[in-house]
Image (cartoon, helix red, strand yellow):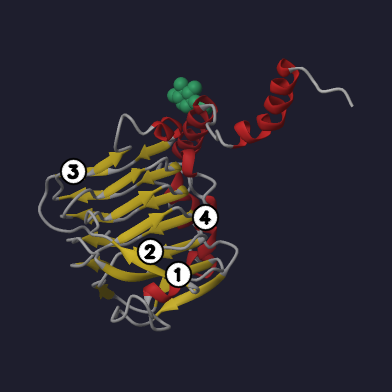
Amino acid sequence: MAIPSLPLLFLFTFLLLLPLLISSSPVQDPEPVVQDVQRAINASRRNLGYLSCGTGNPIDDCWRCDPNWETNRQKLADCAIGFGKNAIGGRDGKIYVVTDSGDDDPVNPKPGTLRHAVIQDEPLWIIFARDMTIQLKEELIMNSFKTIDGRGASVHIAGGPCITVQYVTNIIIHGLNIHDCKQGGNAMVRDSPRHYGWRTISDGDGVSIFGGSHVWVDHNSLSNCKDGLIDAIHGSTAITISNNYMTHHDKVMLLGHSDSYTQDKNMQVTIAFNHFDVDMGISTW
Ligand SMILES: *[C@@H]1O[C@H](CO)[C@@H](O)[C@H](O)[C@H]1NC(C)=O
């Protein structure tokens, strides 16, 4: 067999790598995404005064107009707009009801706790049996394909470390009050049924997205955290941050943490319908 010339070898190698190069650069053309959002907003506004529930907010109108939304919670997963639109969370999984506000052992969380729910491997749509305040002992390290759905209860994640979305995908966080978040760390924390690991000191963010994708953070109130309220860094992408109510904030949001971290050039984040307020108090809307 003839040995191919060096330029040919390069060409073959390049052709072999091409699909890899393409699949590793998930940057969508932003223009159709923006158009799509604008269309959704226009459609909702047209329905104002026509649908009694219409607010002109395409996300809210998508699920709230159904008086039986509570029996069809997973419909919410189809209501996102923007770059995080395809985040399905736990849409295709079972409902998991959190009944226990405790977090005694972040390595061996008890069934019924929020931590036990979010570490599972299967898709889960996580809801709450009643109003509760959850003071986490360590960061809540989420596994992929999870929705935390606080609708119908007043759920506070407060006074301890808060939510971390790290190297996982398809996360929806909706309807929570996330506040007074503190640093955690220098501790073991479970992140899946088969794995736990050492966490160094965390920043103390409300929601920290680190190398995450297909993430939708909607309709939460966030305030008074040690560091950012919502940070998305380390190449995180396909994110929508919408309808959140942010008060008592200093750093608010960090999108990309360093100009020299080149993976961040692919980050695509939609920020829409959020309220940034200097008012006192925590919203529970
Ligand atoms: C949405 O409505 C605005 C104002 O009426 C219009 O200029 C725009 O073209 C519409 N966009 C889409 C995508 O329908």
Q: Determine which of the numbered discs, if any, sits on residue 77 in the image.
A: 4
- Distance from disc 2 to disc 3, alpha carbons, whole Å, reads 22 Å
Helix, strand or loop at mark 4: helix
Question: Nearer the viewer's eye, disc 4 or disc 1?
Answer: 1
Which residue is depicted at the point 71% across and 31% down? 16
Which residue is depicted at the point 24% across and 54% down? 205
**Mark 4 or mark 2, earlier in chain:** 4
Q: Percent x, y for residue 236? A: 42, 43
Question: Nearer the viewer's eye, disc 1 or disc 3?
Answer: 1
Question: Nearer the viewer's eye, disc 3 or disc 4?
Answer: 3
- Please state which amino acid type lies under the numbered disc 1: Ile
Task: Judge whether residue 53 can be spotted in this image.
Answer: yes
**Mark 3 or mark 4, earlier in chain:** 4
Q: Residues within 10 Å of mark 3 (few under 14, many from 20)?
A: some
Task: Judge whether residue 81 can be spotted in this image.
Answer: no
The answer to whether the residues at label 1 and label 3 have Cβ atoms under 8 Å apart is no
Q: Percent x, y for residue 210? A: 38, 49
**Mark 2 or mark 3, earlier in chain:** 2
Q: Determine which of the numbered discs, if any, sits on residue 141 in the image.
A: 2
Q: Residues within 10 Å of mark 1 (few under 14, many from 20)?
A: many
